[in-house]
Amino acid sequence: MRADGPAAVICIRVAVGLVFLSEGIQKFLYPDKLGPGRFDRIGIPAPTFFANLDGVVEIACGAMIVIGLLTRLAAVPLLIDISLAIVLTKLRELQPGGFQGVEGFWGMAHDARTDFAMLLGLIFLLWAGPGRWSLDAWLTHRVEVVRSSAMNP
C-alpha cells in the first residue's frame, strides 16, 4: 500500500486512467462499433455481457487510477483486460489479411501501439505505486496520523 513514490507518477496515472475511462464510456456510447457489436464480430461469446462487463471495469478502474485510489489493485483487472485485448485482437492481425493497411508484424505494431503503452503503463503503476499526489498517499498519511495520535495521547 506504499504511496511514497515521486509526484511525477501522476502523469502516468492520468494518461493510463483516462484512456481506460474513455474506452469504457465509449463501449456504452457506441455499442455497435465498440461494445457488444465489436465483441460479437471478434467472436467473443455472450458479447453483450462481456462488453458491458469490460466497459464497467474500464470505467471504474480507470477512474480509480486517475485519482490514485487503490491504484495497484485497480491495475490488476486492467492488466487482464489489456492482455486479452492484445491476444484477441492484435495477435490476429499477424495472420495474412488480418489488417486492412500494412499486413504482418508492422501492421500489428502500428495498430497495437496504444495497447502496448497501456500494458507498460499498468505494469509501471503496479510496480511503482500511485505516487505522492494520490488519494492512496493521502489516506496512508491520515492513517499514520491517527495511529500516532492514538499511541501518544
Image (cartoon, rainbow, N blue to C red):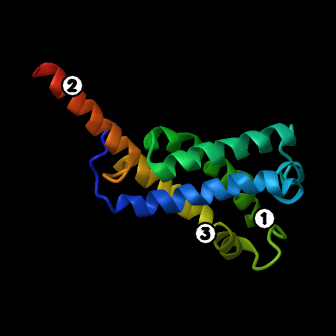
Left or right: 16 as drawn, with respect to 139: right
Q: CA distance from mark 3 to mark 1?
A: 18 Å
Q: Determine whether label 3 and label 1 are within 8 Å by CB.
A: no
Check residue 48 in the rendering and tell me which mark sits there, or answer none: none
Q: What residue do we see at 77% from left, 53% from top?
A: 27
SS at mark 2 in the image: helix
Q: Which residue is mark 1?
A: 95
- Circle 2 residues within 10 Å: few <14, some 14–19, many ≥20: few
Q: Which residue is mark 3?
A: 113
Q: Amino acid at mark 3?
A: Arg
Vertical order, 77 against 105 (above or below): above
Mark 2 and mark 3 lie on one chain; the one further toward the N terminus is 3
Mark 1 and mark 2 lie on one chain; the one further toward the N terminus is 1
Residue in front for this viewpoint, 132 or 92? 132
SS at mark 3 in the image: helix
Q: Amino acid at mark 2?
A: Arg
Q: Which residue is mark 2?
A: 147
Q: What residue do we see at 69% from left, 42% from top?
A: 56
Q: Quadrant of the C terminus?
A: top left
Vertical order, 103 against 33 (above or below): below
Q: Determine whether label 2 and label 3 are within 8 Å by CB.
A: no
Q: What residue do we see at 86% from left, 60% from top?
A: 33
Q: Determine whether label 1 and label 2 are within 8 Å by CB.
A: no
Q: CA distance from mark 1 to mark 2?
A: 58 Å
